[in-house]
Amino acid sequence: MRRSLLVALAVMAACTTNGPSSSQSTPTSSPVSAPAAFTFEPQATASVVAGGCGTTKVYQGGVPASLDQAGGHNNPDGLPYVLADPPIAAGFIFSNPLKAGPQGDKILWVVGIPRARDALAIDAHPYGADHPVVYFNKDADSSPGEIYPTGLAVSSPGCWVLSLRWGTNRAEADLKYG
């Protein structure tokens, strides 16, 4: 009986987890470790505004708490934002509508999976076409939070597909440039 009790306790201990469940990620409580992965979903108070295209929506208001946390509680207030697919990255759009041309419109990208010193690479191309391709790289040298300020300049107006990469992570967003 004692052996059965020990086996049962061992099985229970093996089935117990201290980490986040696979269905919902939550940040770790340790102040020195990186946050666990976040996914971003707009709150019910968010409204869809102009600026998205293809499969991407741009939102105003209702910023997800997980996005606020990933941005180090220092995200810009009142700006429209886009959620990438999958929703592990989001971008705050500083000038909406975005404009094509050499100046490069500022977007503050916040990622829900820690940067781990990985640069953000963006490859952009017109929706429905492979060319032209615009490339942008940003080192993981900004703070607070998991952020990358960018100034991607696209060559022509229209809907552009932005493919984001940092480390082994991938996400896409479609944005309209005037």
Image (tube, grey):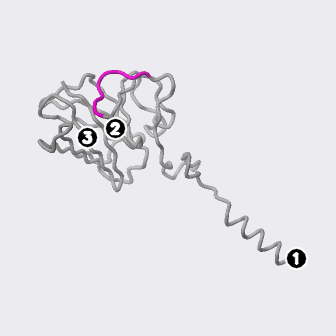
Left or right: 138, with 14 as reference point: left
Please state the extent of the stretch shown in magenta in the rendering. Answer: 47-54
The first of marks 1 and 3 along the sequence is: 1
Q: Residues within 10 Å of mark 3 (few under 14, many from 20)?
A: many
The residue under label 2 is which amino acid type? Trp
Left or right: 119, with 66 as reference point: left
The first of marks 3 and 2 along the sequence is: 2
Q: Which mark is residue 162?
A: 3
**Residue 44, how many percent across, how many down?**
51, 25
Q: Which mark is residue 1?
A: 1
Mark 1 to mark 3 CA distance (whole Å): 62 Å
The residue under label 3 is which amino acid type? Leu
Identify which residue is drawn at 43% across, 37% down.
71
Mark 1 to mark 2 CA distance (whole Å): 58 Å
Quadrant where the image shows the C terminus? top left
Mark 3 to mark 2 CA distance (whole Å): 12 Å
Dots 3, 2 in contact, CB < 8 A: no
Q: Which mark is residue 109?
A: 2
Left or right: 177, with 23 as reference point: left
Question: SS at mark 1?
Answer: loop
Identify which residue is drawn at 59% across, 54% down.
19
Mark in front: 3 vs 2: 3
The residue under label 1 is which amino acid type? Met
Quadrant where the image shows the N terminus? bottom right
Q: Principal SS element in the magenta part?
A: loop
Question: SS at mark 2?
Answer: strand
The image quadrant that residue 167 belongs to is bottom left
